[in-house]
Structures are given as structure tokens and as C-alpha cells.
Image (tube, grey):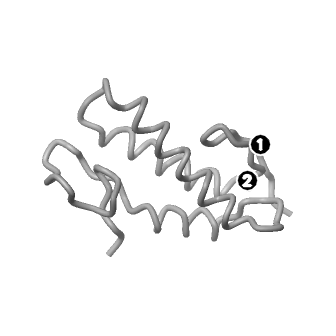
């Protein structure tokens, strides 16, 4: 039996197990820390959370709980955050500051 938590991501409610929550929360914190401009961080994080919500809804299908496998898949699809200070324009996978996993 796993503990679950209710969270809002990108304006949508999800029931998510604790392991998946830690994965997504760590990803968001790392991404937030990589944003060079604090003025942009709010908008960028809102857009990122909306994208995560869309991907989680697709992954859930008829299931009710987001699990670790789903969280890892979403993070893998989005790529891992890197500092935007030295990022070349257009680098990554469509999200400024993201790189595709190796």
C-alpha cells in the first residue's frame, strides 16, 4: 500500500503517490533554480506546470493515481533543466533551459 497526496499541477487536480510527487517536485525545483531571470520564472513555471498536467492527463487514461513510472516518463519527455544563462537560443527540446535526457 502506498500513500497518496492530492496536488494541483497547472491548474488541474491529481492524486499522486508520494514517490511520484517527490520526482515531479524535485524536477520543478531544479528547473526553477535554473532560470536565470527571476522576472521570467513565474511565467515559465506556469507554462511548465501546464505541460506537465497535459502529459499526466494523457498518461493517466482511465487510471486514478499518478505513479512513479508516469512521473519518470513525463520528466524524461520534458528533459532536464539546465541554466538558461549560457544556453544557446533554440537549444534543447522546445523548452528554453531543457535538454533531452542522454
Q: Which mark is residue 69?
A: none
The front one of 28 and 62 is 62
Q: Is residue 29 left or right of residue 99?
A: right
Q: Is residue 40 above or below residue 78?
A: above
Q: Is residue 60 left or right of residue 88?
A: right
Q: CA distance from mark 2 to mark 1?
A: 6 Å
Q: Residue at x 54, y 63 (%)?
A: 74
Instruction: Kindly give the residue lying farthest to the top in the view shown.
Output: 39
Instruction: Kindly give the residue lying farthest to the right in the view shown.
Output: 1
Q: Earlier in the sequence, mark 2 or mark 1?
A: 1
The front one of 7 and 21 is 7
Q: Residue at x 70, y 53 (%)?
A: 18
Report the residue marked by disc 1: 6
Residue 71, x across and y down, in percent = 60, 62
Q: Is residue 67 left or right of residue 64?
A: left
Q: Is residue 36 above or below residue 93?
A: above
Q: Is residue 76 left or right of residue 86?
A: right
Q: Quadrant of the N terminus?
A: bottom right
Q: Residue at x 24, y 46 (%)?
A: 83
Q: Residue at x 30, y 42 (%)?
A: 34
Q: Is residue 85 above or below residue 62?
A: above
Q: Residues within 10 Å of mark 1 (few under 14, many from 20)?
A: few
Report the residue marked by disc 2: 16
Asked whether the beta carbons under mark 2 and mark 1 sit within 8 Å of each other, the answer is: yes
Q: Callout 2: helix, strand or loop?
A: strand
Amino acid at each position: 500500500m502506498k500513500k497518496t497526496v492530492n496536488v494541483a499541477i497547472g491548474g488541474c487536480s491529481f492524486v499522486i503517490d508520494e514517490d511520484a510527487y517527490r520526482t515531479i517536485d524535485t524536477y520543478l525545483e531544479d528547473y526553477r533554480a535554473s532560470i536565470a531571470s527571476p522576472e521570467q520564472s513565474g511565467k515559465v513555471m506556469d507554462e511548465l506546470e501546464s505541460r506537465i498536467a497535459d502529459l499526466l492527463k494523457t498518461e493517466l487514461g482511465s487510471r486514478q493515481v499518478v505513479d512513479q513510472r508516469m512521473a519518470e516518463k513525463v520528466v524524461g519527455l520534458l528533459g532536464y533543466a539546465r541554466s538558461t544563462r549560457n544556453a544557446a537560443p533554440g537549444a534543447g527540446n522546445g523548452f528554453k533551459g531543457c535538454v533531452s535526457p542522454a
